[in-house]
Amino acid sequence: MRLLLMSDTHVPRRAKALPARLLGELPRADVVVHAGDWGDEATLDVLEDRSRRLLAVYGNNDGPGLRSRLPEVAYAELEGLRLGVVHETGPAQGRESRCAARFPDLDVLVFGHSHIPWDTTAATGLRLLNPGSPTDRRRQPHCTYMTATVTAGVLESVELHRLPPRR
């Protein structure tokens, strides 16, 4: 099972649309994960229309329309892998232990908010992934997203993809 992970798209404020390369990944993904801060409902509509399965949450910058359509936390079992999605996890310091305590029944937690790619594992085994942002790199060198595969309940092949600068 192939996963496509993104967060903090902030369309149309930070970009007019999702990058073409990211949109090109949609047909290859079995599950698309968006960890909040969409910016507009049109982007949600695009992902709902083009994704086989969408697992998504709202973020702190998302208004009432998105909040009425999306949960604050989303959960799914993917081939036995227990996955959760949330926008905010708090400061980087102590993140692993804080998230492990809040989400003790998960194998993987995808989050956003910081726009900073993150891939760590808590002492409990909880894997924490932040795909960064495909549209707003902030202080990072590149805009980013992630792909991964799930095989027999195991997360494999997590890859951070860098996008070319916008023109």
Image (tube, rainbow, N blue to C red):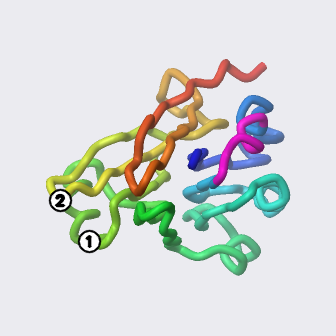
| Sequence-earlier tag: 1 or 2 | 1
Residue identified by numbered label 1: 104
The answer to whether 151 is drawn above or below residue 41 in the figure is above
Could you tell me if the residues under marks 1 and 2 are in contact, i.e. CB atoms within 8 Å? yes
Viewer-closest of 12 and 80: 80
User: Circle 2 — which element?
Assistant: loop
**What is the three-letter code of the residue carrying label 1?**
Pro
The answer to whether 149 is drawn above or below residue 63 in the figure is above
Could you tell me what secondary structure mostly forms the magenta stretch? Answer: helix
Q: Where is residue 149 in the image (x, y as percent from the top left)?
A: 50, 43
Viewer-closest of 94 and 154: 154
Residue at 55% x, 39% y is 147
Q: In this view, does 136 lie to the left or right of 103?
A: right
State the mark number for residue 124. 2
Q: Position of residue 161 (x, y in %)?
A: 55, 28
Q: Which residues lie in the magenta part?
A: 24-30
The answer to whether 128 is drawn above or below residue 82 in the figure is above
User: Is residue 28 on the magenta stretch?
Assistant: yes
User: Is residue 64 on the magenta stretch?
Assistant: no
Q: Residues within 10 Å of mark 2 (few under 14, many from 20)?
A: few
